[in-house]
Image (cartoon, rainbow, N blue to C red):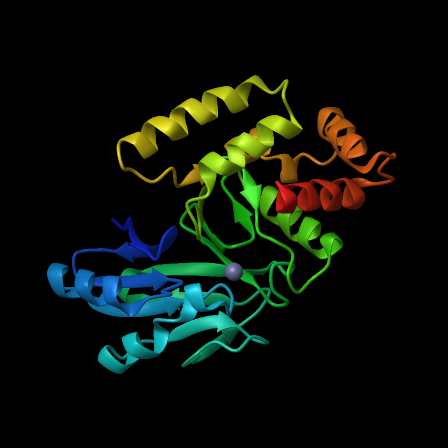
Amino acid sequence: MLEVVPLPAFTDNYIWTLRDARSAAVVDPGDARPVLDYLAREGLALAAILATHHHPDHVGGIAELVAAHEAPVFGPKGEPIPALTHPVGEGDSAEIPALGATFSVLEIPGHTRAHVAYYGLGSLFCGDTLFACGCGRVFEGTPAQMLASLQKLAALPDATKVYCGHEYTLANIRFARAVEPGNALLAAREARAQALRDAGKPTLPSTLGEERATNPFLRCAEPAVVESANKYLGARAADPVRVFAAIREWKNKS
Ligand SMILES: [Zn+2]
């Protein structure tokens, strides 16, 4: 049975660690130190590194990790990932034999040009594309690409566990409540997230069902979200991409 353990890094990153009794794979190790400490403390071998995109807070620890532990490094082809041994894209899979685990690779460009997600075992590791009740900033792609990527993730089953790269949930829920004040599920979600943070626990993983019900960036066709986008724009948003772009811009400024 695999367990997924969050290793906190920097101020709000999580390095997701899949492990059994002997081995561990890590997703987006921006810093090597928490991973090296964890492997040593638990007596685990490093089975693989999975990178979602090239930002330093996701890949900054890879070189130091592979210097200490030989392990395959999976990451998006088309992005500069340190020590990359397995460049992957849409339709590829990341196999981790030591853990008996295989993940499908989904290309989800927008935050960066070749950002990927890893999906398997009912879990989604989605880096900085889909966040709990939010989404990443659109740095290298277009709003149309980012929305298509989010819709691709939203098509996965309701029970899919969402492991994203940052603990941004409470701020995201507050923004979502401004976008969709009538969504009662958001108040309940905020109370649950606040209780977890007060107890020093991560708010993650969430589920895709929960995201579809409360994440405004997955709800760009909902009348209440469209109405808020129109209010922000002072005009009618012509289509879901314009709605998405408007609420993303509003969030950037909030
Ligand atoms: Zn990023």
Residue 160 appears in the rendering: no
Q: Identify which residue, 193 or 126, lies in the foreground.
A: 193
Residue 94 appears in the rendering: yes
Q: Is residue 128 above or below residue 225?
A: below
The part of the image, by quadrant, that contains residue 230 is top right
Identified at 87% across, 40% down, the residue is 238
Q: Is residue 250 left or right of residue 196?
A: right
Q: Is residue 240 left or right of residue 127?
A: right
Picture coordinates of residue 46, whole percent (x, y): 25, 69
Identified at 18% across, 64% down, the residue is 37
Picture coordinates of residue 152, whole percent (x, y): 63, 49
Picture coordinates of residue 8, whole percent (x, y): 30, 53
Q: Identify which residue, 57 or 189, lies in the foreground.
A: 57
Q: Quadrant of the C terminus?
A: top right
Identified at 49% across, 40% down, the residue is 132
Q: Is residue 245 above or below residue 21?
A: above
